[in-house]
Image (cartoon, rainbow, N blue to C red):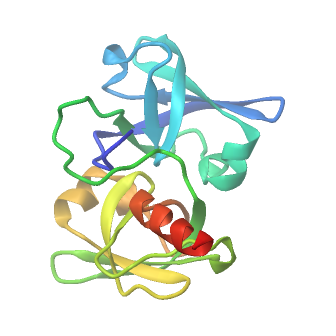
Amino acid sequence: MFTGIVEEIGKITRISKSGTNLDIWVNAKMTPELKIDQSVAHNGVCLTVVSINDSEYQVTAVKETLEKTNLGKLKTGSPVNLERGMKLGDRLDGHIVQGHVDQTAKCTNRKEADGSWEFSFEYDPDLNNITIEKGSITINGVSLTVVNSKKNSFSVAIIPYTYEHTTFKELKEGDTVNLEFDVIGKYVKRIQELG
């Protein structure tokens, strides 16, 4: 379980294929505090630490994860949003994030708004995910509030702190991002479908 509050931006140091899996090595300040078998969200994708070596650690993404996320587009040197699993008893500063990406989206617009930024995204509506105005959405592991919600698109407003401390400053029109829709909204939608 995560909160969508990014702890730091890591850097991909190596990537290698192992069958249909992708082994990914990440350099991060948090590495000395990690342990084998710990969950870390990478651009919102929960992956398990499988090895640690000084300032870098290794995770493995399986085929299903690669098909549903943007992790397969990472390269050596790519920045990645990182968050460790939340501790029981901590404040929930973002929203409940599982680290299970629902689908990807394309950034369709990036606009500076006099001290903040507005990013717009478009996603495939055939997967039946929805956003709601002022509801929560996780984009590349960042907990955000939806504005301008439509059937297959939405926007978010990014404050300067979030812009500087996440990979949003690197995000361009046409880039692919990971989306995790609000878990409570997913349950409500499912109950309505069954009712």
The image shows a total of numbered marks equal to 0
Q: Quadrant of residue 185?
A: bottom left
Q: Residue at x 49, y 64 (%)?
A: 186
Instruction: Please report the residue visible at 24 percent of the width from the left and 29 percent of the height from the top.
Output: 88
Relative depth, front residue between 74 and 155? 155
Q: Is residue 26 above or below residue 144?
A: above
Instruction: Point out residue 79 in the picture as x, y percentages from the top left corner.
Output: 45, 45
For the question of whether residue 109 can be seen, the reply is no
Q: Residue at x 40, y 37 (%)?
A: 10
Question: Which one is in front, 68 or 23?
Answer: 68
Q: Quadrant of the C terminus?
A: bottom right
Which residue is outermost to the front?
195
- The answer to which of 47 and 111 lies nearer the viewer is 47
Q: Residue at x 73, y 45 (%)?
A: 64
> Percent x, y for residue 22?
70, 34
Q: Residue furthest right?
A: 19
Please give left or right for residue 2 compared with residue 113 in the image: right
